[in-house]
Amino acid sequence: MKKTVFLGALTVAGLAAGVSAAATLEDVKARGKLNCGVVTGLVGFGAPDANGEWQGFDVGFCRAVAAAVLGDPKAVEFVPTTGKTRFTALASGEIDMLARNTTWTLTRDVDLKFEFVGVNYYDGQGFLVTKDMGVSSAKDLDGATICIQTGTTTELNLADFFRANNISYEPVPIETNAEGQQQYLAGACDAYTTDASGLAATRASFEDPSAHVVLPEIISKEPLGPLVRHGDNEWEDIVRWTLNALISAEELGITSANIGELSAAPGSNPEVNRILGTEGNLGEMLGLDADWAKRAIMAGGNYGELFAKNIGESTPIALARGLNAQWKDGGLIYSPPFR
Amino acid sequence: MTTITDPKQGQFRLSMLLYDSRYRAITIQIIALIGFLTLIGWLLSNTAQNLAVLSKEPSFSFMFEPSGYDINQRLLDYDSQDTHLRASLIGLLNTLLVAAMGCVAATIIGVIIGVLRLSPNWIVSRLTAVYVEGFRNVPLLLWIVFTMAILIETLPRPSAFRKGEASMSLWDTVAMTNRGIYIPEPLFSRSLGDMHLLGASALRFDVSLDLLALLAVVIAGFLTSILIKRRADIIQEATGLRPRTWHLRLGVVMLPFLLVLTILGFHLGYPELKGFNFRGGIHLRNSLIALWVALSLYTGAFVAEIVRAGILAVSTGQTEAASALGLRPKRTMSLVVLPQALRVIIPPLISQYLNLTKNSSLAIAVGYMDITGTLGGITMNQTGRELEAVLLLMLVYLAISLTISAVMNWYNQSVTLRER
């Protein structure tokens, strides 16, 4: 009798492509394009419009960075990522930065080796349900089937919330927002949960948004912000201060309408002058030219303009500034000084 | 006249490694081996170096951290405070469940369709040909997503049952909703309870004593039944008359079984609409059904072709000889053709089972929480341990595949032609 011997061959998939540690800026300049990770499609935050042009709040930030670094807000290669693929894409160097409603947590910052450059949207996790269900609180959701995007912090918050309130639920894991929307609308889940901003954006794209309601409970803190790989501090600084420039611009009244006038000659406000490069050498310190912040602001406007144009109250998504108002208006949006 | 003399036995020279055919084969193999090992070594050192640059030293300690997420379909108890290891185990069991269900269904579908495709009936053979070609030639992922979409979009949502727009099927025992199918579950009012094994470790599991009792009774019944058959054989050999035994044999299996069921207080628990969903009963989730149906139909098409090939490989002389002996067509198929066809069928069938098991990792498309969904999905994403998680995942699939292969090879050897 023939005896078969089994030999298991284990193939180690090596990371053949070397991950360069500190040359993102040079890479981006050499490539002439910024690879920016965005959502696969969330109206208002990042989605292609009817002409195939990417539009949205997070997309606008990618364009601002591209304008600051490369001088062209269109020089962006948008890489759609899901909740699951985003970190691998960033860690492997496939994208230079990730601007995709990603929550800043200790694990992601420390253990996953990323650097969050700041917060561009203060959010919290909510629940979307249909009005005819007659649910007024998330605590009424005992036994409900809930659609949830896998690989997100919301997945963990959901488990914690139901555990803390000692009620049961049935999770239905989904990959993308579009898939969640489809399952929710078909009634395959009673509630859809993600960041409240995402819920508002999703609801706005429904045929009849008034038949759906976001429950009042916000069960978590979700500070969303752009992030880059750990270890390349120069690049991290550029992305961080581009965000800060957009925020400061709103605070100091620099808008896409008056920026041409303000940057023509040094004005009376020294900080405006420093941001716009008419005074000092902040751009040089970052390894960029003097006009970097001007271009970033011109790409899509300052923080407030980006917000109003993409997700603000005049858009179908209709998000109030709330926590995301400037600190002077009682919000949390605050930039360190340009000095 | 010339004499042929042996070439002079010279000393070993280095050039002989290349020019002497006795050594050349070995030389080439050694060079190839060195090249292969260098490649592996380069891959390993490259991986280690790049991970070190990212300051992510390989470590498997994350498997023992609490997972923090919930899993909807769990064959063992599990909650979000359990470890990633436990979550992976739950996923592994889900993989094995759908693979086992798929292999059984694909075999049944494949054998039936394969035999029918050889039918002289024109419509039957053409219809089965359409099935085989249709399923074989469309990617499996599309079938899975398509099945899922059908389930979600066509079946009524649970709220429709509350409003009276939909009602339960089969005398109010089965609820078919777009969140899955709820079927009655077996319950025991005088249950013997469960046996808890392996304490509180990540691999702990419970064994139902009711199930063990039932299994013991059934096995004992079958053994007794075999004894009765042996006795009948002996009587037949001695007297030429075979006593009627079927009622005895049925009795020794069924009566004790029914008796134990009654003692344990067997009854069915029916699903009931409570709150948002049905409660009670066994919940076959959409994701499981979609994956199972698509995997079985897809692999079934391949199995059908294997079965057809196996049957065609048995020469027509065998069928004709069987007819000449007076065997009816059905018995010819089961007694003469199929046993011989099995020898041809089994080896390719093994690879279909392996394919099915590995294809079950497409579960991710419909959110079925198999091991790719837990260990290779959420765990990998929450811990950021891509390399470790993928390595573990590959090892797990390798182990499953080798096990299936071993079992099927053993079965293959038991049906091969024994030459005397």
Image (cartoon, grey):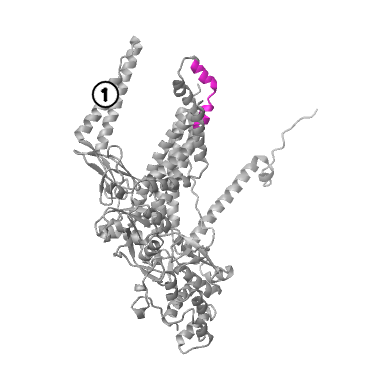
Does the rendering let one see residue A4? no
Q: Is residue A195 left or right of residue A299?
A: left
Query: Percent from the top left, x then y, of residue A288?
Result: 53, 77
User: Which residue is depicted at the point 35% across and 12% down?
Assistant: B237
Q: Which residues are magenta?
A: B306-323
Of B388 and A286, the residue lying toward us: A286
Query: Percent from the top left, x then y, of residue B195?
Result: 24, 42
Kind of residue indicated by mark 1: Gly
Which chain is indicated by disc 1? Answer: B
Outermost bottom residue: A268
Query: Percent from the top left, x then y, of residue B203?
Result: 32, 48
Q: Is residue B410 left or right of residue B285?
A: right
Q: Is B235 a magenta residue?
A: no
Of A312 and A221, the residue lying toward us: A312
Of A172 and A111, the residue lying toward us: A172
Number of residue marks: 1
User: Which residue is depicted at the point 35% across and 10% down?
Assistant: B240
Within the image, what quadrant is residue B25 found in? Answer: top right
Magenta highlight: main SS: helix
Please say if B338 is above or below B23.
above
- Quadrant where the C terminus of chain A is found in the figure: bottom left
Please say if B153 is above or below B406.
below
Q: Is B309 a magenta residue?
A: yes
Badge 1, how many Cα within 10 Å: few under 14, some, many 20+? some
Of B139 and B256, the residue lying toward us: B139
Q: Secondary structure at mark 1?
A: helix
Q: Which residue is mark 1?
A: B251
Does the rendering let one see residue A123? yes
